[in-house]
Every structure is written in C-alpha cells, then in structure tokens.
Amino acid sequence: MHTSRTPRAVVIGAGIGGLTAAAALHTRGWHVTVLERAPSLEPVGAGISLSPNAQRALDVIGLGDEIRARVALQGDAGLLTPGGRWLARTDGAAVAERFGGPLVLLHRATLAGLLAARLPDGALRTGTAARLTDPGDDDRRARVATADGELEADLVVGADGINSAVRSALFPGHPRPAYAGFTTWRVVVPAPERPFPPHETWGRGRLWGTQPLKDGRVYAYASALAPEGGRAPDDEKAELLRLFGTWHHPVPGILAAVAPADVLRHDVRSMTRPLPAYHRGRTALLGDAAHAMTPNLGQGGNQAIEDAVVLAHHAAPGAPATLGAYTRDRLPRTTDIVRRSARTGRLAMAGGAPGLLLRQALLTAAGRFAPGLLLRGYAGITDWCPPAPTYAAGTGAEAERQGGHR
C-alpha cells in the first residue's frame, strides 16, 4: 500500500520506454503512476527489433527470457538489390554470435502488453493528459498537472516521445529534432505462402525491409527521400506501389495484402544537437524525448529500454533520484548511437549515382571477403549490459547469465 515513506514516480507517456521505466521502478520499490493521453494502450501497428542489449535490460524486470523465446530469425539474412541480388548476407548463428544473442522481432503491442502486465493495478491511467508544472529540486518535489488535479512526485519521467512537452519545459531554448531528409512507412501483414529470407533492400534513395514475426505475420518497413511533411496525393499504399511495386519477392505480395488504412507514414527526425543533460531537478527524460534517432540501426526502442533500467538503478528507493549519474551514464552512449545511426542512414539512403555505386561496391566486397564487417557497425552497442545484476531474476539461466556481467 502506498504510504508517505514510499517514493513516488510519475511517468508521462506509456510507450515502450515509459512502461519499462515504470516496471523497473516498481520492482525497485517505487509507487508508480503512468499517465497516457491516448484513450487506450494501443501502440502503433508496427514491429520492434529487440537486440541483446535490450534483452539484457529486460532481464532486470524478469522479462528477458520471455522475449528470447519469441525469436523468429533463422537462416540467411542480409542486404539485397531491388532486383533480388544479394549484396551481402549472413546467417542467424553468425548474427547471434556477433551480437551476443539473437535479434527478436515482435509487434509493439505485444511488448507493451507484457510490460503493462508487470505494473500494479491502477498504475496506468489512459486518457489522461499531463503537463510538467515544476521539475522539482533537492528540497522540493516535482509537480505534474492533470485534469483531475496536480500530482507531486519524487521523480517525474518524461517518456512522451519525439515531440516531448517535458523536454521543452526542461530545455525551452534547445532545438527540436531535425528532419533527416527521408520519410518512412510501416506495415504488419500475414506472412506470404512463398518463403523469403529476412532482409533489407537498398535502392537509389529508397529502402525496404521485410522481417518475420514469431506469430506468423510479417513486419515490413520502407523509407524514401522526400520533402518534409509530404503525403501521397491518393493514399500511402498507392505511394508504396509506385516506389516499390516492381521490387523483388516478397515486396509485391506484401503490398497486395496491405489495406491503405493500415499503412503508417512518419517523417524521420533525429536529435542532431544533443541535450546538455537528460535531467533537471527531479525530472528525467528517456527515449525519443531525450535522444531521437533515425531507425537505421534499429536502436531507438532498445535505447529507451536501456534508459529505463539505468534510471531505475540510480533512483534508489527512499532517497531523491541521483539523476546526475543517470545523465553521465546515458548521454555519451546515446549521443554516439544517434550519430552512428545518422551515418548509416546517409549510406542506406544514398540517392546520387556516385554514392550509389560506391555503396554497392563496398557492400559487395564486404559480403564476399569479410562477412563479419557489416556487423562491426554494432560493436559497442549490442554488447551492453545493465549496470548491476538483475533484481527481478532469482535463480536459473537468467541469474547465471547476469552473473557474468560487469
């Protein structure tokens, strides 16, 4: 039962990062309240790739092994041309060996449900818009305003996404995330009958990815160079058909199975200028609110999950959160990943003929003579471990795995 001696955390935003933070803080003994302005917990209909670093973070709340059990990636995977020729390939075993474990693709709604199930009854309040009115300090609790009244908290977590109002309140003069020069589409459809290898396909200023999910569906995503704020003159399925309809199997079949209303389109933005800190007073930022990045390394959600468990690690029950340590742990790492992701995005989205030819030559050479070279871009990312042994796992494989972490 909540008492005045129990530290209270208010999390603004029930995305993947916010739910992970709430679950981790609850595990650490905090009374948590999650405020989500949407009327229900229904994440956008898209997939998320969880790499071993995020899986280890989820070990902290006892969810890692359940995620690993959903792995679907098997056999060859790699990069293709729009005509279906391999530029570079590797197999699932090589990926798992290089990354320290398998990559797990699952629907965001699945992950959100697993995280929400780890919260106590009443902790999640949907249909509740929230506004930070006071970030607090060492001598004053933070305050959050809602339509039902004001909440005081020992810790406020701004997990309100790329257009974060909490970030704007903490750092009002800081530039907002900048447009990366391309837009992205995402769909989830039933798997086609004819099998295909998981892949990304890089064309001239265009990219397509198709990844299987454990539940028998396929998560597909696409990107293309485009003016900021653009929209199709008819519908986004028609736009995808114009851009990718003649590409290799399974792209045409996936597009045929998509309903126009189920295509998600978003311009890609990233935090090209890092924040000076990820906290102020008793308020912390995580995920896209702190360090929005392009999707090209697949680390946006993974870094939000890392943020969440590191924040909970430093926010000791019974004392004000030591948020300076959180910033010191997270800002250098995430800034580096934001920049690396942006570089990968520029390579993947090359539109000019010289850059395109150079990219194809480099990838072909890497695939033929040094298959592991393409995986080295993840060095220092996927081998990350939580800052302390898990405090949710007790014995067995999960505890043994954590015993080797430093």
Image: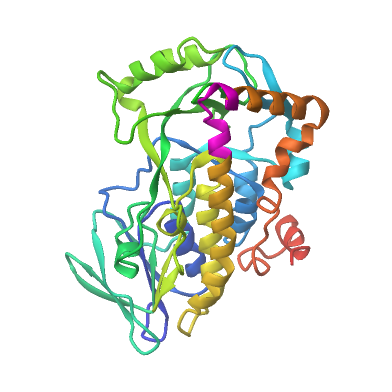
Instruction: Write the residue at 78% across / 42% down.
Output: 97
Horizontal and vertical percent position of residue 299: 55, 47
Instruction: Relative to 317, say whether 367 is above or below.
Output: above
The image position of residue 164, as x and y in percent, is 33, 57
- In x, y percent, where is residue 247? 52, 13
**Camera-nearest residue between 315 and 359:** 359
Classify the position of the N terminus by image quarter. Answer: bottom left
Q: Is residue 123 magenta?
A: no
From this viewpoint, is residue 370 visible?
A: yes
Residue at the limit of the structure toward the top, as seen here: 246
- Identify which residue is drawn at 63% across, 46% down: 51
The structure residue drawn at horizontal position 62% and vertical position 51%, both measured from the top left corner, is: 55
The quadrant where residue 79 appears: top right
Is the magenta region chiefly helix, strand or loop?
helix
* Quadrant placement of the C terminus: bottom right
Picture quadrant of residue 258:
top left
Q: Residue at the front extreme?
A: 354
| Relative side of 354 to 282, left or right | right
Q: Relative to residue 367, is residue 67 depicted above or below?
A: below
Q: Residue furthest right?
A: 369
Res. 398 image quadrant:
bottom right
- Residues shaded magenta: 344-355
Q: Is residue 120 above or below residue 374?
A: below
Residue nearer the viewer, 125 or 271:
271
Q: How is the image coloured?
A: rainbow
Q: Position of residue 153 (x, y in %)?
A: 34, 77
| Res. 213 visible in picture | no
Q: Residue at the spot x=65%, y=21% of the render?
A: 197
